[in-house]
Image (cartoon, rainbow, N blue to C red):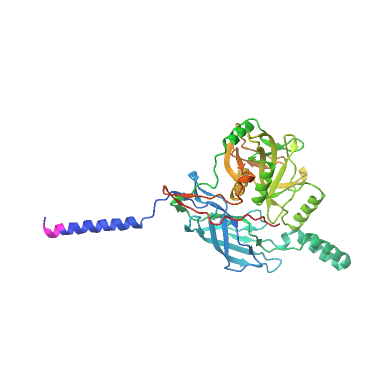
Amino acid sequence: MSAPALLAILVGVVLLGSRSATGSAEEEPPAVAVLPAGTKIYLRLETPVSTTKSHLRGEIQARVVRDVLAPSDADQVVIPVGAVAKGIIAKLIPTSSPTTRARVRLEFPSWEIPDGTELKLAGHLVEVENARETVLADGTIQGLLESELPLTHLETALERLKKTNPQVAGEIQKVSERNLGKSDTSIDLPAGADLHWVLDEPLKSDRVFPPIVSDRLSAGVTTALDGLLADAPQRASSKEGNPGDPLNLVLVGNAEDVRRAFEEAGWSEAAKLNEKSVWETLRAVIANRGYREAPVSQLYLYNRPEDLAFQKMYNTFAKRHHLRLWRTPVSTADGREIWLGAATHDTGWDIRPEEGIVSHAIDPEIDDERDKVGADLAVAGQVAALRHTTRPVPLSEGLTATGAKWKTDGRLLAAELKPREEFSGSLPPRSQVRDNGHSADCPWGKPPSVLLLSG
Protein backbone atom coordinates (compact mmCIF):
# COMPACT_ATOMS: atom_id res chain seq x y z
CA MET A 1 0.00 0.00 0.00
CA SER A 2 1.32 3.42 -0.91
CA ALA A 3 2.16 6.03 1.71
CA PRO A 4 -0.60 8.47 0.57
CA ALA A 5 -3.25 5.72 0.80
CA LEU A 6 -2.08 4.71 4.26
CA LEU A 7 -2.16 8.36 5.37
CA ALA A 8 -5.72 8.74 4.05
CA ILE A 9 -6.86 5.70 6.02
CA LEU A 10 -5.28 7.01 9.23
CA VAL A 11 -6.90 10.42 8.79
CA GLY A 12 -10.27 8.76 8.18
CA VAL A 13 -9.99 6.67 11.33
CA VAL A 14 -9.10 9.76 13.37
CA LEU A 15 -11.97 11.79 11.94
CA LEU A 16 -14.45 8.95 12.46
CA GLY A 17 -13.34 8.52 16.05
CA SER A 18 -13.60 12.26 16.64
CA ARG A 19 -17.10 12.34 15.15
CA SER A 20 -18.18 9.38 17.30
CA ALA A 21 -16.80 11.01 20.43
CA THR A 22 -18.55 14.28 19.60
CA GLY A 23 -21.79 12.43 18.91
CA SER A 24 -21.55 10.57 22.21
CA ALA A 25 -21.04 13.84 24.08
CA GLU A 26 -24.16 15.34 22.51
CA GLU A 27 -26.41 12.34 23.06
CA GLU A 28 -29.08 12.71 25.73
CA PRO A 29 -28.75 10.41 28.73
CA PRO A 30 -31.11 7.44 28.55
CA ALA A 31 -34.53 8.06 30.05
CA VAL A 32 -35.25 6.28 33.32
CA ALA A 33 -38.98 7.03 33.10
CA VAL A 34 -41.45 8.66 30.72
CA LEU A 35 -44.63 10.53 31.62
CA PRO A 36 -47.06 10.38 28.67
CA ALA A 37 -49.09 13.31 27.42
CA GLY A 38 -52.26 13.59 29.47
CA THR A 39 -50.53 12.83 32.79
CA LYS A 40 -52.29 14.76 35.56
CA ILE A 41 -50.26 16.84 38.01
CA TYR A 42 -51.86 18.08 41.24
CA LEU A 43 -50.86 21.62 42.20
CA ARG A 44 -51.62 23.91 45.13
CA LEU A 45 -51.66 27.59 44.30
CA GLU A 46 -49.35 29.76 46.42
CA THR A 47 -50.11 33.11 44.76
CA PRO A 48 -53.68 34.45 45.09
CA VAL A 49 -55.30 35.21 41.73
CA SER A 50 -58.28 37.53 41.30
CA THR A 51 -59.99 39.06 38.28
CA THR A 52 -60.51 42.23 40.34
CA LYS A 53 -57.10 42.56 42.03
CA SER A 54 -54.48 40.70 39.96
CA HIS A 55 -52.71 42.02 36.86
CA LEU A 56 -52.25 40.56 33.40
CA ARG A 57 -48.80 38.93 33.04
CA GLY A 58 -48.44 38.94 36.81
CA GLU A 59 -46.14 36.23 38.16
CA ILE A 60 -47.68 33.27 39.97
CA GLN A 61 -46.42 30.14 41.69
CA ALA A 62 -47.86 26.77 42.64
CA ARG A 63 -46.42 23.64 44.19
CA VAL A 64 -46.83 19.93 43.44
CA VAL A 65 -48.78 18.22 46.25
CA ARG A 66 -48.85 14.63 44.96
CA ASP A 67 -45.96 12.55 43.70
CA VAL A 68 -46.23 12.11 39.92
CA LEU A 69 -45.52 8.44 39.33
CA ALA A 70 -44.09 6.68 36.31
CA PRO A 71 -46.94 4.64 34.78
CA SER A 72 -44.68 1.60 34.51
CA ASP A 73 -43.52 1.60 38.14
CA ALA A 74 -45.45 2.98 41.13
CA ASP A 75 -42.18 3.22 43.11
CA GLN A 76 -40.65 5.65 40.60
CA VAL A 77 -41.54 9.28 41.22
CA VAL A 78 -40.75 11.47 38.22
CA ILE A 79 -42.01 14.81 39.63
CA PRO A 80 -41.93 14.79 43.44
CA VAL A 81 -44.02 16.61 45.98
CA GLY A 82 -42.51 20.04 46.58
CA ALA A 83 -41.63 20.76 42.94
CA VAL A 84 -42.42 24.40 42.13
CA ALA A 85 -44.40 25.50 39.07
CA LYS A 86 -43.64 29.09 38.07
CA GLY A 87 -45.87 30.97 35.69
CA ILE A 88 -47.88 34.01 34.72
CA ILE A 89 -51.48 35.16 34.39
CA ALA A 90 -51.78 34.85 30.61
CA LYS A 91 -55.39 36.02 30.37
CA LEU A 92 -57.37 38.27 32.73
CA ILE A 93 -60.85 39.50 31.82
CA PRO A 94 -62.99 40.92 34.64
CA THR A 95 -66.78 40.90 34.55
CA SER A 96 -67.98 44.03 32.74
CA SER A 97 -71.77 43.49 32.84
CA PRO A 98 -74.40 41.02 34.14
CA THR A 99 -74.23 39.20 30.78
CA THR A 100 -70.44 38.73 30.62
CA ARG A 101 -68.27 36.15 32.36
CA ALA A 102 -64.98 36.73 34.12
CA ARG A 103 -62.12 34.72 32.66
CA VAL A 104 -58.56 33.99 33.66
CA ARG A 105 -55.90 31.63 32.31
CA LEU A 106 -52.83 30.53 34.23
CA GLU A 107 -49.70 29.25 32.51
CA PHE A 108 -46.83 27.38 34.18
CA PRO A 109 -43.97 27.01 31.66
CA SER A 110 -41.09 26.75 34.18
CA TRP A 111 -40.75 24.05 36.82
CA GLU A 112 -38.10 23.47 39.46
CA ILE A 113 -37.57 20.05 41.02
CA PRO A 114 -36.45 19.95 44.69
CA ASP A 115 -32.93 18.86 43.65
CA GLY A 116 -32.55 22.11 41.69
CA THR A 117 -33.27 20.69 38.23
CA GLU A 118 -35.25 23.06 36.01
CA LEU A 119 -37.81 21.78 33.51
CA LYS A 120 -39.81 23.32 30.69
CA LEU A 121 -43.19 21.62 30.53
CA ALA A 122 -46.04 22.11 28.09
CA GLY A 123 -49.48 21.66 29.60
CA HIS A 124 -52.72 23.30 30.64
CA LEU A 125 -55.18 23.54 33.51
CA VAL A 126 -58.17 21.20 33.47
CA GLU A 127 -59.84 21.72 36.86
CA VAL A 128 -60.03 23.89 39.95
CA GLU A 129 -61.13 21.53 42.72
CA ASN A 130 -64.60 22.19 44.12
CA ALA A 131 -64.97 25.48 42.23
CA ARG A 132 -68.25 26.92 41.01
CA GLU A 133 -66.35 28.07 37.92
CA THR A 134 -65.67 25.84 34.90
CA VAL A 135 -62.43 25.28 32.98
CA LEU A 136 -62.50 25.49 29.18
CA ALA A 137 -60.55 23.25 26.80
CA ASP A 138 -57.66 25.72 26.53
CA GLY A 139 -57.27 25.96 30.32
CA THR A 140 -59.20 29.21 30.75
CA ILE A 141 -61.17 29.45 34.00
CA GLN A 142 -64.63 30.81 33.21
CA GLY A 143 -66.83 32.47 35.81
CA LEU A 144 -70.59 32.54 36.30
CA LEU A 145 -73.19 34.94 34.99
CA GLU A 146 -75.19 36.90 37.55
CA SER A 147 -78.30 35.03 36.40
CA GLU A 148 -76.68 31.74 37.45
CA LEU A 149 -76.40 32.82 41.09
CA PRO A 150 -79.42 31.93 43.28
CA LEU A 151 -78.92 35.16 45.22
CA THR A 152 -79.48 37.19 42.05
CA HIS A 153 -83.09 35.98 41.84
CA LEU A 154 -83.73 37.26 45.38
CA GLU A 155 -82.14 40.60 44.51
CA THR A 156 -84.28 40.86 41.36
CA ALA A 157 -87.44 40.15 43.36
CA LEU A 158 -86.51 42.87 45.86
CA GLU A 159 -86.03 45.39 43.05
CA ARG A 160 -89.55 44.63 41.85
CA LEU A 161 -90.92 44.92 45.39
CA LYS A 162 -89.32 48.38 45.74
CA LYS A 163 -91.68 49.69 43.07
CA THR A 164 -94.79 48.82 45.14
CA ASN A 165 -93.50 48.81 48.72
CA PRO A 166 -90.05 50.42 48.98
CA GLN A 167 -89.99 50.44 52.79
CA VAL A 168 -90.56 46.68 53.16
CA ALA A 169 -88.18 45.94 50.28
CA GLY A 170 -85.52 48.11 51.88
CA GLU A 171 -85.74 46.29 55.21
CA ILE A 172 -85.59 42.87 53.54
CA GLN A 173 -82.61 43.98 51.48
CA LYS A 174 -80.72 45.04 54.60
CA VAL A 175 -81.34 41.64 56.20
CA SER A 176 -80.34 39.88 52.97
CA GLU A 177 -77.08 41.78 52.54
CA ARG A 178 -76.19 41.34 56.21
CA ASN A 179 -76.75 37.58 56.11
CA LEU A 180 -76.13 36.60 52.50
CA GLY A 181 -73.92 39.33 51.07
CA LYS A 182 -74.21 40.60 47.49
CA SER A 183 -73.96 38.77 44.19
CA ASP A 184 -70.35 38.50 43.04
CA THR A 185 -69.28 36.81 39.80
CA SER A 186 -65.58 37.66 39.99
CA ILE A 187 -63.03 34.84 40.06
CA ASP A 188 -60.97 34.73 43.25
CA LEU A 189 -58.51 31.88 43.70
CA PRO A 190 -56.94 32.02 47.17
CA ALA A 191 -53.54 30.68 48.10
CA GLY A 192 -54.26 27.04 48.83
CA ALA A 193 -56.62 26.44 45.89
CA ASP A 194 -56.07 22.96 44.44
CA LEU A 195 -55.49 22.79 40.68
CA HIS A 196 -55.34 19.91 38.19
CA TRP A 197 -52.82 20.40 35.37
CA VAL A 198 -52.08 17.96 32.53
CA LEU A 199 -49.08 17.46 30.26
CA ASP A 200 -49.60 18.29 26.59
CA GLU A 201 -46.36 16.55 25.59
CA PRO A 202 -44.49 13.53 27.00
CA LEU A 203 -41.78 14.14 29.59
CA LYS A 204 -38.64 11.98 29.54
CA SER A 205 -36.72 11.95 32.79
CA ASP A 206 -33.21 10.65 33.47
CA ARG A 207 -33.84 10.53 37.21
CA VAL A 208 -36.51 9.35 39.61
CA PHE A 209 -37.24 10.00 43.27
CA PRO A 210 -38.45 7.87 46.18
CA PRO A 211 -42.09 8.33 47.29
CA ILE A 212 -42.88 11.05 49.81
CA VAL A 213 -43.77 8.48 52.49
CA SER A 214 -43.06 4.81 52.99
CA ASP A 215 -45.60 2.14 52.13
CA ARG A 216 -44.40 -0.08 54.97
CA LEU A 217 -46.76 -0.07 57.91
CA SER A 218 -45.22 -0.99 61.25
CA ALA A 219 -45.44 -4.67 62.17
CA GLY A 220 -47.93 -4.07 64.99
CA VAL A 221 -50.23 -2.10 62.69
CA THR A 222 -50.10 -4.76 59.99
CA THR A 223 -51.04 -7.49 62.46
CA ALA A 224 -53.95 -5.51 63.91
CA LEU A 225 -55.14 -4.49 60.46
CA ASP A 226 -55.18 -8.06 59.15
CA GLY A 227 -57.29 -9.12 62.11
CA LEU A 228 -59.71 -6.22 61.66
CA LEU A 229 -60.27 -6.62 57.91
CA ALA A 230 -60.78 -10.37 58.14
CA ASP A 231 -64.40 -9.81 59.21
CA ALA A 232 -64.93 -6.02 59.31
CA PRO A 233 -68.05 -4.47 57.73
CA GLN A 234 -67.63 -3.44 54.10
CA ARG A 235 -70.14 -0.59 53.98
CA ALA A 236 -71.83 1.95 56.19
CA SER A 237 -75.62 2.10 56.15
CA SER A 238 -78.45 4.57 56.54
CA LYS A 239 -80.43 4.75 59.78
CA GLU A 240 -83.02 2.53 58.13
CA GLY A 241 -80.37 -0.09 57.36
CA ASN A 242 -80.00 0.57 53.63
CA PRO A 243 -76.44 -0.04 52.36
CA GLY A 244 -74.52 3.22 52.13
CA ASP A 245 -71.01 4.35 51.25
CA PRO A 246 -68.31 1.67 50.92
CA LEU A 247 -65.48 1.78 53.44
CA ASN A 248 -62.25 2.73 51.68
CA LEU A 249 -60.03 4.19 54.42
CA VAL A 250 -58.24 2.89 57.51
CA LEU A 251 -56.58 5.35 59.89
CA VAL A 252 -54.32 4.38 62.76
CA GLY A 253 -54.04 6.93 65.56
CA ASN A 254 -55.93 8.29 68.52
CA ALA A 255 -58.72 10.85 68.12
CA GLU A 256 -56.36 13.72 68.93
CA ASP A 257 -53.97 12.53 66.22
CA VAL A 258 -56.80 12.27 63.69
CA ARG A 259 -58.16 15.76 64.39
CA ARG A 260 -54.71 17.33 64.24
CA ALA A 261 -53.85 15.51 61.02
CA PHE A 262 -56.89 16.77 59.13
CA GLU A 263 -56.57 20.28 60.51
CA GLU A 264 -52.96 20.47 59.31
CA ALA A 265 -54.03 19.06 55.93
CA GLY A 266 -56.56 21.86 55.39
CA TRP A 267 -59.70 19.87 56.15
CA SER A 268 -62.43 21.06 58.54
CA GLU A 269 -64.38 19.02 61.04
CA ALA A 270 -68.06 18.95 60.10
CA ALA A 271 -70.46 20.71 62.42
CA LYS A 272 -73.17 18.77 64.19
CA LEU A 273 -76.61 18.98 62.58
CA ASN A 274 -78.52 21.63 64.54
CA GLU A 275 -80.46 24.86 64.01
CA LYS A 276 -77.32 26.97 63.55
CA SER A 277 -75.64 24.64 61.05
CA VAL A 278 -78.88 24.28 59.06
CA TRP A 279 -79.16 28.09 58.80
CA GLU A 280 -75.52 28.39 57.70
CA THR A 281 -76.13 25.68 55.11
CA LEU A 282 -79.13 27.58 53.75
CA ARG A 283 -77.08 30.77 53.53
CA ALA A 284 -74.32 28.96 51.64
CA VAL A 285 -76.77 27.43 49.15
CA ILE A 286 -78.57 30.71 48.42
CA ALA A 287 -75.33 32.69 48.12
CA ASN A 288 -73.64 29.86 46.16
CA ARG A 289 -70.58 29.90 48.38
CA GLY A 290 -68.70 27.46 50.53
CA TYR A 291 -69.37 26.51 54.16
CA ARG A 292 -66.24 24.95 55.62
CA GLU A 293 -67.94 23.25 58.58
CA ALA A 294 -71.14 22.16 56.80
CA PRO A 295 -72.78 19.16 58.50
CA VAL A 296 -72.97 15.78 56.80
CA SER A 297 -75.89 13.38 56.83
CA GLN A 298 -75.45 10.54 59.29
CA LEU A 299 -74.42 7.06 58.22
CA TYR A 300 -74.12 4.12 60.59
CA LEU A 301 -71.50 1.51 61.40
CA TYR A 302 -71.27 -0.66 64.51
CA ASN A 303 -74.87 0.45 65.25
CA ARG A 304 -73.94 4.12 65.68
CA PRO A 305 -73.44 7.22 63.51
CA GLU A 306 -69.98 8.38 62.51
CA ASP A 307 -67.67 9.43 65.35
CA LEU A 308 -65.87 12.06 63.27
CA ALA A 309 -66.46 13.73 59.90
CA PHE A 310 -64.19 16.03 57.90
CA GLN A 311 -64.51 17.95 54.66
CA LYS A 312 -62.72 20.31 52.31
CA MET A 313 -64.74 22.89 50.39
CA TYR A 314 -63.96 25.94 48.26
CA ASN A 315 -66.51 28.44 46.91
CA THR A 316 -69.70 26.46 46.39
CA PHE A 317 -71.77 24.26 48.66
CA ALA A 318 -72.50 21.93 45.73
CA LYS A 319 -68.98 20.45 45.71
CA ARG A 320 -66.82 19.15 48.52
CA HIS A 321 -64.42 16.42 49.56
CA HIS A 322 -65.73 14.69 52.65
CA LEU A 323 -65.39 11.58 54.77
CA ARG A 324 -66.82 9.88 57.83
CA LEU A 325 -64.84 7.91 60.40
CA TRP A 326 -65.88 5.25 62.89
CA ARG A 327 -63.72 4.02 65.78
CA THR A 328 -63.38 0.25 65.49
CA PRO A 329 -63.24 -2.19 68.42
CA VAL A 330 -59.66 -3.08 67.41
CA SER A 331 -56.50 -1.33 68.60
CA THR A 332 -52.80 -1.94 68.01
CA ALA A 333 -50.74 -3.71 70.66
CA ASP A 334 -49.39 -0.35 71.86
CA GLY A 335 -52.90 1.09 72.27
CA ARG A 336 -53.40 3.13 69.11
CA GLU A 337 -56.98 3.24 67.87
CA ILE A 338 -57.94 2.02 64.40
CA TRP A 339 -60.66 3.82 62.42
CA LEU A 340 -62.63 2.76 59.37
CA GLY A 341 -63.66 5.52 56.99
CA ALA A 342 -65.78 6.23 53.92
CA ALA A 343 -64.63 9.05 51.62
CA THR A 344 -66.62 10.35 48.65
CA HIS A 345 -66.49 13.50 46.53
CA ASP A 346 -69.66 15.60 46.18
CA THR A 347 -69.71 17.01 42.64
CA GLY A 348 -73.15 18.64 42.36
CA TRP A 349 -76.78 18.15 43.22
CA ASP A 350 -78.90 15.02 42.92
CA ILE A 351 -82.54 16.15 43.02
CA ARG A 352 -85.30 13.59 42.34
CA PRO A 353 -88.64 15.01 43.56
CA GLU A 354 -90.59 11.90 42.55
CA GLU A 355 -88.45 9.89 44.98
CA GLY A 356 -88.23 12.57 47.65
CA ILE A 357 -84.44 12.83 47.25
CA VAL A 358 -82.49 16.07 47.54
CA SER A 359 -78.86 15.18 48.02
CA HIS A 360 -75.38 15.66 46.66
CA ALA A 361 -74.31 13.79 43.54
CA ILE A 362 -70.98 12.01 43.95
CA ASP A 363 -68.09 11.16 41.69
CA PRO A 364 -68.57 7.42 41.04
CA GLU A 365 -64.76 6.94 40.94
CA ILE A 366 -64.45 6.76 44.71
CA ASP A 367 -60.84 5.54 44.57
CA ASP A 368 -59.83 9.06 43.51
CA GLU A 369 -61.28 10.47 46.73
CA ARG A 370 -59.60 7.77 48.80
CA ASP A 371 -56.23 8.73 47.32
CA LYS A 372 -56.97 12.46 47.70
CA VAL A 373 -57.28 11.96 51.46
CA GLY A 374 -53.97 10.13 51.66
CA ALA A 375 -52.18 12.70 49.51
CA ASP A 376 -53.38 15.65 51.60
CA LEU A 377 -52.32 13.98 54.85
CA ALA A 378 -48.93 13.07 53.36
CA VAL A 379 -48.10 16.54 52.01
CA ALA A 380 -48.91 17.97 55.44
CA GLY A 381 -46.32 15.63 57.01
CA GLN A 382 -48.95 13.76 59.00
CA VAL A 383 -48.34 10.11 58.11
CA ALA A 384 -45.57 7.65 58.86
CA ALA A 385 -46.75 5.22 56.16
CA LEU A 386 -49.45 4.87 53.49
CA ARG A 387 -50.39 1.55 51.99
CA HIS A 388 -53.20 0.18 49.83
CA THR A 389 -54.56 -3.01 51.28
CA THR A 390 -57.19 -5.49 50.14
CA ARG A 391 -59.78 -7.27 52.25
CA PRO A 392 -60.54 -10.99 51.69
CA VAL A 393 -63.62 -10.33 49.52
CA PRO A 394 -63.20 -6.88 47.94
CA LEU A 395 -66.06 -4.75 46.65
CA SER A 396 -66.23 -3.55 43.04
CA GLU A 397 -69.39 -1.46 42.51
CA GLY A 398 -72.75 -0.59 44.00
CA LEU A 399 -75.20 2.16 44.99
CA THR A 400 -75.18 4.57 47.93
CA ALA A 401 -78.11 4.87 50.34
CA THR A 402 -79.62 7.51 48.01
CA GLY A 403 -79.05 5.46 44.85
CA ALA A 404 -75.85 7.05 43.49
CA LYS A 405 -73.52 4.71 41.58
CA TRP A 406 -69.95 4.06 42.68
CA LYS A 407 -67.12 1.75 41.63
CA THR A 408 -63.77 0.82 43.12
CA ASP A 409 -60.73 -1.41 42.71
CA GLY A 410 -61.66 -2.87 46.10
CA ARG A 411 -58.64 -1.61 48.00
CA LEU A 412 -58.61 0.44 51.20
CA LEU A 413 -55.94 3.05 51.90
CA ALA A 414 -54.33 2.51 55.29
CA ALA A 415 -52.71 5.59 56.83
CA GLU A 416 -50.52 5.18 59.89
CA LEU A 417 -50.58 8.64 61.47
CA LYS A 418 -47.61 10.12 63.28
CA PRO A 419 -48.10 10.35 67.04
CA ARG A 420 -47.87 13.86 68.48
CA GLU A 421 -44.29 13.38 69.67
CA GLU A 422 -43.19 12.51 66.12
CA PHE A 423 -45.11 15.20 64.25
CA SER A 424 -42.82 17.86 62.80
CA GLY A 425 -45.39 20.01 61.00
CA SER A 426 -43.52 19.87 57.69
CA LEU A 427 -42.69 17.53 54.86
CA PRO A 428 -40.29 14.70 55.62
CA PRO A 429 -36.86 15.31 54.09
CA ARG A 430 -36.25 13.50 50.83
CA SER A 431 -32.59 12.67 51.38
CA GLN A 432 -31.71 11.15 48.04
CA VAL A 433 -32.61 11.15 44.38
CA ARG A 434 -32.07 8.18 42.14
CA ASP A 435 -30.23 9.40 39.04
CA ASN A 436 -29.52 6.62 36.51
CA GLY A 437 -28.71 4.33 39.38
CA HIS A 438 -26.57 6.86 41.25
CA SER A 439 -27.44 8.84 44.36
CA ALA A 440 -27.12 12.53 45.06
CA ASP A 441 -28.16 14.90 47.82
CA CYS A 442 -31.64 16.31 47.24
CA PRO A 443 -32.65 19.00 49.77
CA TRP A 444 -36.32 19.89 49.88
CA GLY A 445 -35.94 23.59 50.37
CA LYS A 446 -38.96 25.28 51.86
CA PRO A 447 -41.91 22.84 52.18
CA PRO A 448 -45.29 23.90 50.78
CA SER A 449 -47.43 25.59 53.38
CA VAL A 450 -50.87 24.12 53.99
CA LEU A 451 -53.57 26.77 54.02
CA LEU A 452 -57.25 26.48 54.84
CA LEU A 453 -59.43 27.60 51.97
CA SER A 454 -61.85 30.41 52.69
CA GLY A 455 -65.56 29.97 52.00
Q: Quadrant of residue 307?
A: top right
Residue 387 lies, in percent from the top left, at 57, 40
Q: Quadrant of residue 414?
A: top right
Residue 243 lies, in percent from the top left, at 71, 36
Relative to 266, is 400 above or below? above
Q: Quadrant of residue 181?
A: bottom right
Of all residues shown, which one is farthest toward the front? 421
* Overall secondary structure of the magenta section: helix
Q: Is residue 247 visible?
A: yes
Q: Is residue 262 left or right of residue 84?
A: right
Question: Where does the C terminus fall, quadrant-wise?
Answer: bottom right
Q: Is residue 377 left or right of residue 440?
A: right
Of 351 and 413, the residue lying toward us: 413
Residue 320 lies, in percent from the top left, at 68, 50
Of 258 and 15, the residue lying toward us: 258
Residue 222 in the magenta stretch? The answer is no
Span colored in magenta: 2-6
* Residue at figure coordinates x 78%, y 60% from the top left: 180
Q: Is residue 307 left or right of residue 104?
A: right
Of 378 and 205, the residue lying toward us: 378
Q: How many marks?
A: 0
Q: Is residue 365 visible?
A: no
* Residue at figure coordinates x 75%, y 34% from the top left: 303
Question: Where does the N terminus fall, quadrant-wise?
Answer: bottom left
Of 124 and 377, the residue lying toward us: 377
